[in-house]
């Protein structure tokens, strides 16, 4: 192993000790992940050497959360190259095939494309003739993506927790914790960091139909962390604001345009609208790897529509509608910048107008 | 049987032929109801002569929907008197005991108190000495409440359907159809009437967590009626408006104050807020028996909080959160008048300011 790779591994180990856990990691040429579709009922780790299996895990949400998807995709490309044998060209071909397979898993999360673009760049840029050197470079890049995500989460936690006032009730949507990233989380990472710093906060977690990531995953992380929280159904959000029971909203993002349009889990726009009517701050927390440097008008965000059976059943376990009922199932919605109080990144907090602040932040990368 | 009672029964029969079905009715001294907690899986009718059993059925939502609760409560009091033996005073005492038991079932739906007040008034007002005459008077009042509800629904259907333009997509929340009333429904009754009149409409039905009345009951009624619809999760409402996929909202109400504050199924206020931001009409449909003639400031609406297990499970059938998770479970929220485009009653459409228009409508009773 090269000195560089050894250093990256040590850095990664040291960062992982600072977070509670990671749902996806590299182990001896395999990608290992916690299958979050089985939480909170079972904690099952799965592993593979097969890129198609990993792609399936991303598609069916065993691995989900924009940053975790990005990290898994990076490791997946590394895995394809690492386990291939043959010439540099043969390895490159395996790597690019993996990039292509993983690129078609989910359309909305920008981190996926960010990570795959980086992996592709490293593969294409390699001009040497040593297969083992290429393997190390590719694995190094995947580990770097994971390291940067961990560092971003820790940094966002520091920056974002400053925005939370002692005694507040913070509402969050879906799951944006360790289970959605390489560890700690984005929005939920900020909440956990505020709590660790001794701020007396309470959390409202929305259950997040159809796949209940709030009820299953956020509740699981908040319980683990010992943070007081209440679970609510998604349609209780209006009531909570009307009754003055929420002080602040922090959510994550799957894609942010350079002008501040935020694609995030379905339901986010509804929450933002209610918060806006009640004059309460609505923050988005995401690493810069979530920011797509184009404007919303230049390139409309593609919203993934998933199987309607996710709506007509509960997790495929219980039918809740009459047979033959048709349903809509957009997995994300778009919150326009005028509803977003600020965007918290690892490079600082962006305030409106986002076209200026986000460009400045991206420029400082 | 008195001539008056015979006439009421004939009128009721004739009205019931105009609606698809009724979920609650009188049969030989018993109250019979469709247990809607088992829909859409099973169609089970239950019956009782016992007021406590009927009260339990209302509490655990075997009978639900503000107008249906009112009708069931009226029939329940009639049942108590009808099945009692003894003097007029003994019958009156049974009737008033039933009023008291039924009064404590659910706090928010005004129709319950409207119906019980009427039943109590008839019992107290009886000055004769014939037990059988008292029985007939009390049953007559209960049947009148049911008849008036059916007439109100048919009238609201006529009036409200005029507000729907051909080709529109109408969003509705929870269940406000035959299953929530004595037949046809309020908001859903209007939608069904517009469809029957040949208007080419589409419906969006929100699933309505926690108890999924939209997915289970509204979908069931819309399928029966053959009206094209799509089911969505509650948090998709923002997305639908953002994408321009909804033209109009029509919901029911559990209680309306004289100044136009609308208590309705949890989630209504969230929908109203989104509709308001997008400048789309938001109508409330309810019979005048839902209007409490006091202002919101005079008497704050009591919001029923139900068992948190309704949130941490799906209908008690599937646990969705880690053990020990705490949840909030307000069953209703309040939509303020500034978000309500109009209130459709059987006496006409009320427009803002509601303090004037509703007072005029109530006055015309």
Image: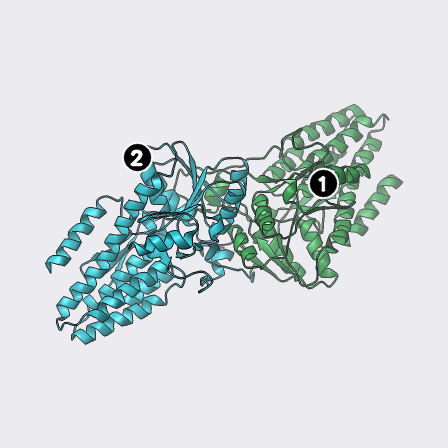
Chain colours: A cyan, B green
Identify the residue at horizontal 51%, vertical 57% (top origin). Answer: A312
Q: Residue furthest right?
A: B3
Q: Tell me the quadrant of the picture where the C terminus of chain A can be found.
A: bottom left
**In front: A108, or A72?**
A108
Residue B47 at x, y percent in the picture:
66, 43
Residue located at (46% from left, 37% from top): A247
The residue shown at (14%, 72%) is A128
View extreme (top): residue: B89
Front residue (pair A160, B217)? A160
**Distance of label 2 from label 1 (alpha carbons):** 50 Å
Relative placement, left or right, of B222 versus B141 is: left
Subunit bearing disc 2: A
Nearer the observer: mark 2 or 1; the answer is 1
Compared across the picture, whether A251 is left or right of B103 comes to left
Q: Is residue B94 left or right of residue A356?
A: right
Residue identified by numbered label 2? A197
Which quarter of the picture shows residue B287?
A: top right
Chain letter of mark 1 equals B
> Residue A245: x, y in percent?
49, 35
Where disc 2 sits, the SS reads loop
Q: Which quarter of the rendered picture does the N terminus of chain A lie within?
A: bottom left
Rendered position, B219 above or below B272? below
The answer to whether tags 2 and 1 share a subunit is no
- Count neighbours of disc 1 (C-alpha within 10 A) and say few if under 14, some if 14 to 19, many if 20 or more: few
Foreground residue, B22 or A110?
A110
Report x, y in % for residue A67: 33, 55
Q: For the point 47% across and 57% down, which residue is it?
A: A310
Q: Which mark is residue B353?
A: 1
Foreground: B324 or B169?
A: B169
């Amino acid at each position: 192993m090269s000195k560089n790779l050894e250093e990256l591994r040590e850095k990664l180990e040291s960062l992982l000790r600072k977070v509670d856990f990671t749902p996806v990691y590299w182990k001896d040429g395999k990608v290992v992940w916690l299958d979050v579709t089985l939480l909170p009922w079972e904690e099952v780790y799965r592993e593979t050497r097969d890129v198609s299996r990993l792609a399936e895990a991303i598609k069916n949400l065993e691995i989900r959360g924009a940053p975790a998807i990005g990290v898994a995709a990076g490791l997946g490309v590394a895995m394809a190259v690492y386990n291939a044998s043959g010439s540099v060209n043969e390895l490159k071909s395996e790597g690019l095939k993996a990039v292509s397979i993983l690129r078609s898993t989910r359309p909305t999360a920008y981190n996926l494309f960010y990570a795959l673009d980086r992996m592709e760049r490293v593969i294409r840029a390699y001009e040497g003739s040593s297969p083992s050197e290429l393997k190390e470079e590719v694995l190094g890049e995947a580990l770097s993506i994971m390291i940067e995500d961990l560092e971003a989460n820790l940094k966002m936690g520091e920056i974002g927790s400053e925005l939370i006032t002692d005694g507040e009730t913070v509402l969050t949507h879906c799951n944006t914790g360790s289970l959605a990233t390489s560890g700690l989380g984005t929005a939920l990472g900020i909440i956990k960091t505020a709590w660790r710093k001794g701020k007396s906060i309470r959390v409202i977690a929305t259950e997040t139909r159809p796949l209940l990531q709030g009820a299953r995953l956020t509740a699981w992380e908040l319980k683990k962390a010992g943070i007081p929280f209440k679970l609510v159904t998604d349609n209780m959000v209006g009531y909570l604001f009307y009754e003055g029971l929420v002080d602040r909203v922090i959510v994550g993002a799957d894609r942010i345009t350079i002008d501040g349009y935020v694609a995030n889990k379905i339901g986010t726009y509804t929450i933002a609208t209610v918060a806006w009517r009640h004059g309460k701050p609505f923050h988005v927390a995401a690493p810069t790897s979530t920011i797509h440097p184009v404007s919303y008008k230049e390139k409309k965000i593609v919203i993934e529509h998933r199987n309607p059976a996710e709506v007509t059943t509960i997790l495929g376990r219980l039918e809740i509608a009459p047979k033959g009922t048709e349903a809509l199932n957009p997995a994300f919605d778009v919150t326009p910048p005028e509803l977003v109080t600020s965007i918290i990144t690892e490079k600082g907090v962006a305030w409106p107008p986002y076209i200026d602040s986000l460009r400045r932040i991206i420029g400082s990368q």
